[in-house]
Amino acid sequence: MKVLVATEKPFAKVAVDGIRKEIEAAGYELALLEKYTDKAQLLDAVKDANAIIIRSDIIDAEVLDAAKELKIVVRAGAGYDNVDLAAATAHNVCVMNTPGQNSNAVAELALGMMVYAVRNFYNGTSGTELMGKKLGIHAYGNVGRNVARVAKGFGMEVYAYDAFCPKEVIEKDGVKALDSAEELYKTCQVVSLHIPATAETKNSINYALLKDMPKGAMLVNTARKEVINEAELIKLMEERADFKYITDIMPAANAEFAEKFAGRYFSTPKKMGAQTAEANINAGIAAAKQIVGFLKDGCEKFRVNK
Ligand code: NAD
């Protein structure tokens, strides 16, 4: 069996070493295609691969057509919108992601950005503290749970709303589960966003939801930019000088936010929530383990094209 690691932006060496160890221990062969610059290189490399590990690399119908021996593709990371799931299913190829492997990295960034914002972006002036503030976690998935854990360490009062996670699961962690997004935003001065971008959630963070946040409100987005209704957020921030927006996903209207809301708007230059050595290593090794589990035992636990 041949496992190909196809990464335009390669894993760290230590992650590749870990992947190799898993694959070779299972008796399989590892092939590397790193820093490729042309799709033709990918089309050539996949020809005899039985399994592929990717990062943000595009696996479309053309790649799947070329990969005649392919059984499984694993996206080392959470999001898998770079893989054509319908085409993979049509080619009888299993697609998996590696959920949870970067959640602590994203959670630490969310809390780090909160501290940065309440301390006025470290500009030397007096700020405020997170301790005692009400934090609302919007979606209690892998990242949301880690944010709750870290925020409790800061002494924040933690609330959460998740459309699908049972309240008992949330409350078991010492987090107060609320019944609706509206209630969460009305209750909490700081809201940390962790919803996926779906047909239902796109543009859902809007004026109506944000307008009732308590005085000194702050919205922290480490999820996806598509979930924000940018025009309505701008309108709200024009009306409320106390409102801060802090994001790891640069808005389409970044220049307008930066110009209008200096001192209460911050965006990372490039999405960096999952950009840590640890997350990189965890996701790569998890991908290798999932491939071995699938090829040896038929385990489809993290399959996303069911
Ligand atoms: P996850 O799948 O573990 O959790 C998502 C949660 O959202 C689930 O608990 C689900 O029940 C809940 N949910 C879905 N639709 C909802 C809705 N309409 N209302 C309320 N809750 C809803 O995902 P995760 O790994 O925790 O990732 C969360 C978000 O963070 C995703 O948007 C992901 O793309 C993003 N992310 C960003 C980075 C980064 O680098 N900034 C890295 C990883 C993940």
Image: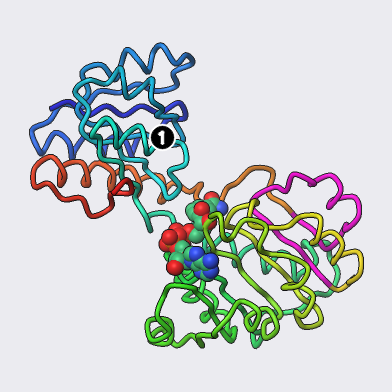
Q: Is residue 145 left or right of residue 281?
A: right
**Type of residue at label 1?**
Asp
Classify mark 1: helix, strand or loop: loop
Residue 208 x/y as whole percent: 76, 72
Residue depicted at x 26% and y 30%? 91
- Tell me if residue 103 can be seen: no
- Tell me if residue 99 can be seen: yes
Q: Nearer the viewer, residue 227 or 75?
A: 227
Residue depicted at x 31% and y 40%? 74
Q: Which residues are magenta?
A: 243-266
Disc 1 residue crowd, few under 14, some 14–19, many 20+, Cα 10 Å: some
Q: Is residue 265 left or right of residue 109?
A: right
Colour mapping? rainbow
Indicate if the residue with disc 1 has its beta carbon within 8 Å of ligand 1. no
Residue 40 x/y as whole percent: 41, 11
Determine if the magenta segment contains residue 285: no
Residue 234 x/y as whole percent: 84, 59
Quarter of the view holding residue 84: top left
Residue depicted at x 25% and y 40%? 94
Q: Quadrant of the N terminus?
A: top left
Residue that numbered label 1 is attached to: 84
In this picture, is 220 found above or below 278? below
Residue depicted at x 47% and y 72%? 140
Q: Is residue 295 left or right of residue 290?
A: left
